[in-house]
Amino acid sequence: MQWELTFLGTSAGRPTKERNVSAVGLSLEQESGWMLFDCGEGTQRQIMRSGLSSGKLETIFITHLHGDHYYGLPGLLDSRKMDRITKALTIYGPKGIERFLNCVMDTTEKKLGYPLHIIEYETNQEIVFAHFSLKILPLHHSIESHAFYIKEHTVSNRLDEKKLRNAGLPPSPHYGELKKGREVTVEGKVYTPEDYLLDPIKGRSLIIAGDNSKPEILGDHLNNLDLLVHECTYTQEVYDHLPVKILHATARELGMAAQKHGIKNLIATHISPRYRKSGKYTLAMLKEEIETSYRGKLWIAEDFDHYRMDPKDGIVHNTRVPIKGTPTDDVELFD
Ligand SMILES: [Zn+2]
Ligand SMILES: [Zn+2]
């Protein structure tokens, strides 16, 4: 099974010419819809440029209620109405998200034309979906902030169909019985599940974290993690000299936590606008500081970066070039 991550916004606090504010899309190979994690202002336009289909967006998870993580919601909901998308949309967010969205809808037009479900989650709540479970973990920030721990279900009841066919049992309802661990007898021959079940495929795990000044707070959830997507707003020296401290992670702390817990792949995002490709503060400084302690695979996220999580290849990194042309080139307009 393949998972795909598309970074739609990687800047901290406010957008820059190169980076929009927080948003990342997650698509699962076996599902037609996709999920969005955070929705900073302008995310809907980033979606258009990314190649993701806004009509197939099914679920949005918001980490916390700082504007750079959710001010894109009203516009996105409105455009969905104008595009006459009828697919239901579910938004999971912390306490207060419902009041915010109701206020927006009360003061504009109420009718969306599609079902909108708003769910205020609780810290440590676990939500089970068809192919994975998602746990809400608390973080350390200036307001309540959360990480999403996503654990793919382990697939344990796969049959070796080739072996069964060779043994004289073609596909039939007996396969269902064997999958349930029950022995079957066909024309006097006994088939035992242990002989025909393949090894389980262990589910992968991934954390998409919101703003957080203490990566270590994620504790045991970091152990054996396949991928951590975490903020990395500052280098340590810049953070130490900030006149007013905002609770964010430094590259140094992130690298230390990632190494301590043996994280295989790390994507650092939510980059302070002061870090650029060249100049006084560079993206290379962030990377080098993480690498002073971290030895796993590391990327500093850019807008429209696209990562494929393949069970065989680990993570394959591709940069997706934004779609050229005006965003409305290929949509039918109804307004
Ligand atoms: Zn932020
Ligand atoms: Zn924040």
Image (cartoon, rainbow, N blue to C red):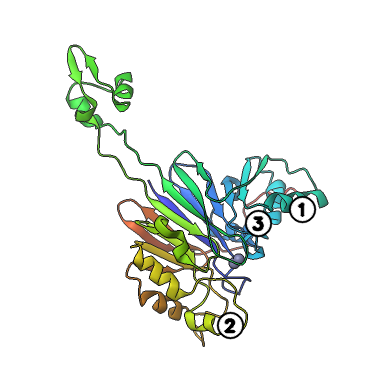
**Residue 335 shows up from this direction:** no
Q: Nearer the viewer, residue 93 or 110?
A: 93
Q: Residues within 10 Å of mark 3 (few under 14, many from 20)?
A: few
Res. 176 image quadrant: top left
Q: At label 3, which amino acid type do we have?
A: Thr
Q: Residues within 10 Å of mark 2 (few under 14, many from 20)?
A: few
Q: At label 2, which amino acid type do we have?
A: Leu
Tell me if residue 246 comes above or below residue 309 in the rendering. Answer: below
User: Mark 2 = which residue?
Assistant: 242
**Residue 153 shows up from this direction:** yes
Image marks 2 and 3: residues in contact by CB distance under 8 Å: no
Tell me if residue 180 comes above or below residue 271 in the rendering. Answer: above
Q: Residues within 10 Å of mark 1 (few under 14, many from 20)?
A: some
Query: What is the CA distance from the residue labelled 1 to the residue labelled 3?
Result: 25 Å
Question: Looking at the image, which residue is at 36% across and 41% down?
Answer: 154
Query: What is the CA distance from the residue labelled 1 to the residue labelled 2?
Result: 35 Å
Residue at the farthest bottom position: 280
Horizontal side of residue 209 vs 224, given as left or right: right
User: Mark 3 = which residue?
Assistant: 328
Q: Quadrant of ligand 1?
A: bottom right
Q: Secondary structure at mark 3?
A: loop
User: Mark 1 = which residue?
Assistant: 104
Q: Nearer the viewer, mark 1 or mark 2?
A: 2
Question: Looking at the image, which residue is at 40% across and 74% down?
Answer: 290
Tell me if residue 176 comes above or below residue 260 in the rendering. Answer: above
Q: At label 1, which amino acid type do we have?
A: Val
Marked residue nearer the N-terminal end (1 or 2):
1
The percent position of residue 1, horizontal first and vertical second, equals: 37, 45
Image marks 1 and 2: residues in contact by CB distance under 8 Å: no
